[in-house]
Amino acid sequence: MLRSWVRNPIDTFVLERLESEGTTPSPEAARSTLIRRLYLDLIGLPPPPEALEAFLADHRPDAYERLVTHLLSSRHYGEKWARHWLDLARYADSDGYNDGPRPHAWRYRHWVIQALNRNLPFDQFTIQQMAGDLLPDATVEQRVATGFHRNTLTQRETGTDREEFRVKQIVDRANTVGAVWLGLTVGCAQCHDHKYDPITQKEYYRLYAFFNGDKEVNIEAPLPGEMGPYLQQSPEYQRRRRELLDQYPALALQPQWEARLLEVASTSEVDLIWTLAWRKVGWLFDGGQEILRLDPSQRTQKQKDQLSDYFVGAYNHVVDKGKYEELGLAKLKEELVKMRTEFPSLSEAQTLIPHSHPPTTHLHLRGDFRNPGIEVRPGTPAVLHPLLSQTAPTRLELAQWLVSKKNPLTARVTVNRMWQEFFGTGLVGTAGDFGVRGERPSHPKLLDWLATEFMSSGWNLKQMHRLIVESATYRQASKLRLDLQELDPANRLLARQTRLRLSAELIRDSALAASNLLYPVVGGKSILPPLPKGLADLGHRFQGWEKSQGKDRYRRGLYVLAKRTAPYPQLMVFDAPDAQESCTRRERSTTALQALNLLNDPVFFEAAQALAIRLLQEESGDVQKRLEYGFQVCLAREPNSTETDRLLRYYEQQREILRQEPASIAKVLPLELIDKTDPASAAAWVGVSSVLLNLEEFITRE
């Protein structure tokens, strides 16, 4: 009888293990549970009531498979799965350290979303991020993909040792490649041979060498629809810019300023202020020092503009502040910024390219970059399959080596992370460590088969996701079973599904979706949602946090500005990673602060208000009917009698309290939002809505 439970090969492997342990799988979950599970797992949003109703009424034998196809083709699929990849890519919108902004970082995130939506094969997904700039006739988008490497922490403070932090960036790139594609803790070999895995220190620096000869550059990477308006209005912008600059005679000082910087750069005589200004040219915009060395006649218009803007903004670094004001450069800086905002601009992206004069790479004795050892050339660990080119391999050959079919490790690591997202824990529990100290796989044969299937499918991510979610293993109920509590308390045998607390971003997304506040536009720049009251006064990290206006403030959590030293509080409370390094698995904690956040955070209170209005507008029945509709919207199911009775009593209590305190009604629900409804009754629904959004079931995927 159990053989009829099998829906695809995944189930065969799982059933074999269950039978060997003398147990059986759980029954299939209810259809309402399945649709909510699929929506949250594949696109990261709860099912709308109309989708729930349609699925429950669809009795065709392939109704479930049709739903999977629909969700895999959704534009929100890329958003859901981009979040997991951005954890691995240690994505952030700021530098770390002194935490300056990265205004162009979002362009890489945009690329990831679009690549996942169009189901770019994972081998190409890898190659373009590792070495898109080295592909023949590389497109702008392929070069944008190398933004993966630009997600390192960056120290831009003047006075710092630039070489020290450049080395830290390269170390991070080597470590990240090891964790993301190989599932190995290669960074343990930075100072000495790896204590456990067969990776020598020399092999570590051979991997490091692939990135040591690279240079960071920003490129123009326009989105569709940007280039036309930009080209059309560019002549007018340049005309107005020249007119503005002509009004300030202080610009005549720029040649002298440039000459002084070049003089400081070419002498050993220390003039601290000018030396720091010279260093800062190299930090503030790509190629600044190289542009300064060019003859003015050889500079492009963009380079001229960049250098003039830097002169205007930085001249006060080397002159008296009062003199800077007297010259009018402070006012000119404001005028230039204002003018740029009035004209169309092109999106830019952070990328990587080979340096024209790359340095040689040496092993760092005891990991100290100031103490170089033997020279090493790019290469890979000998314990894995050999690199095709042994003479002068590049990042492109490293990328091709990573996704070679002779290297099943990358496929195993990748499918294991997929499994982790669908079941809470990978077949190998240590997703970032497949080495000697990592866990043994719970189902070795299944892991091997999935890896082989992944490569045979053409590295098709969506096909693998379909394979997993269409299995009987995935469709099981998650109800706790007493017979498994001693045998398998961690559910490693997969005799049931796992209840998973939603990720930080999905909790926010679910609240916005349930309340009809969600602005579902895909891609684009980061947003600044409202902060909890008083937070900006606690320190300088949140100063200047000008919250987004209009619909933008209701975009998905994926787009919330990721500031390394000051993470958005709601995301931090619900265990979002700090983006200091690659995160291969998020933790799931349970704290009292989470409940307080859901109850009091301005985003969730506003969501409760909007959900109350939705229930009043979309369900014209009595209070019980509205309660039932609220359960469908938030939990994709009907309430039971106990839940209905308790919430009815709560609603009556809230309404009575508000009637006795009419001044509180407008604080709970602004009167202008109430249409032909008793104000106290309408405001009472805000309390009920808040309860629904605070339920453990609401923030959990069954």
Image: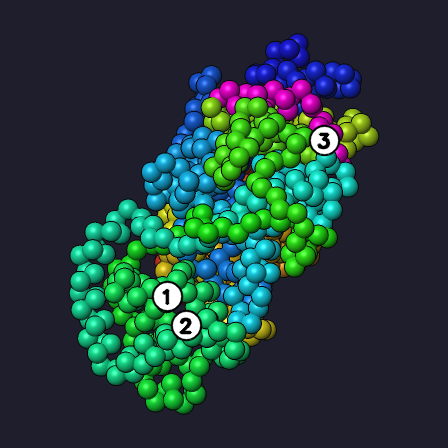
> What residue is rendered at 29% in x and 83% in y?
250
**At which x and y percent is residue 608?**
50, 55
> What residue is rendered at 53% in x and 52% in y?
359
How crowded pointer 3 is (Cα within 10 Å; few <14, some 14-19, many 20+) is rated as some
Disc 1 target residue: 293
551 to the left or right of 59 = left
Any mark on residue 649, and which?
none
Comparing marks 3 and 2, which lies closer to the viewer?
Answer: 2
How crowded pointer 1 is (Cα within 10 Å; few <14, some 14-19, many 20+) is rated as few
**What colouring style does the render use?**
rainbow
Point out the stretch of residues depicted in magenta: 436-457
> What residue is rendered at 48% in x and 73% in y?
267
Three-letter amino acid code at the position of disc 3: Asn
Disc 3 target residue: 491
Three-letter amino acid code at the position of disc 1: Arg
Disc 2 target residue: 262
In the foreground, 194 or 118: 194
Q: Could you say which quadrant of the image residue 135 lies in? A: top left
Label 2's element?
Answer: helix
How crowded pointer 2 is (Cα within 10 Å; few <14, some 14-19, many 20+) is rated as some
Three-letter amino acid code at the position of disc 2: Leu
In the foreground, 17 or 139: 139
The mark nearer the N terminus, 1 or 2, is: 2
In the foreground, 417 or 211: 211
Q: Quadrant of the N terminus?
A: top right
